[in-house]
Amino acid sequence: YIRGPRRLDYVFVTPNVMASVERSCMLPFHTGLGGDHRPLLIDFDARKLFGDESYEIHRPQLRGLTLQDPRTVDKYLDILQTQLEYHKIYDKYEDLQEKSDQGAWSNECILKYERMDNIITESVIHADRMVAKRYSTRYEWSPEIIRSVN
């Protein structure tokens, strides 16, 4: 902590986790997020910690939705709304809410809820793809003209 003489920044691990610690470090003040605390990092041996290899972390995919352009946001919301209405998500939600309020929640309700969640996820992905730019803006020509030239 930069504004005091006492150390406030720590990382604590259990003895079982300690066996998997390979190295650690403390970065200087104002590194990364720029707060008044020092960032602390720990590298773990994934095989020791989790019992197997961990998965590589992949960069997230770029989204078609950009919040800086209100036209894109409106188009995204319109497409998403159309999908949710088409799949009757609001009706399904009301039915499940009623069952929950009545204390009649069952395994069938869980399955319906999971199906509804999958539909919502697919609808969000669909709307995002529909507003995504489909061509590079590096060229002044349309994609059709570029294909015909090449």
Image: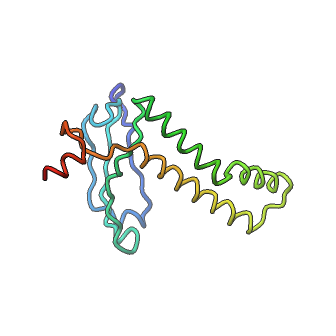
Indicate the position of residue 70 as horizontal and vertical percent values.
Answer: 45, 29
Q: Locate residue 140 relative to residue 26 in the image: left or right.
A: left
Residue shown at the point (55%, 45%) measured from the top left: 80
Q: Is residue 37 above or below residue 114?
A: above
Residue shown at the point (42%, 33%) measured from the top left: 67
Pick the front one: 126 or 12 = 126
Indicate the position of residue 132 as horizontal and vertical percent values.
Answer: 38, 44
Q: Is residue 38 above or below residue 52?
A: above
Indicate the position of residue 7 as horizontal and vertical percent values.
Answer: 36, 36
Residue shown at the point (38%, 45%) measured from the top left: 63
Indicate the position of residue 96 as horizontal and vertical percent values.
Answer: 76, 55
Which residue is situated farthest in the right direction here? 102
Quadrant, the N terminus: top left
Pick the front one: 20 or 68 = 68
Pick the front one: 19 or 136 = 136
Q: Is residue 104 above or below residue 51?
A: above
Looking at the rendered structure, the number of numbered marks drawn on it comes to 0
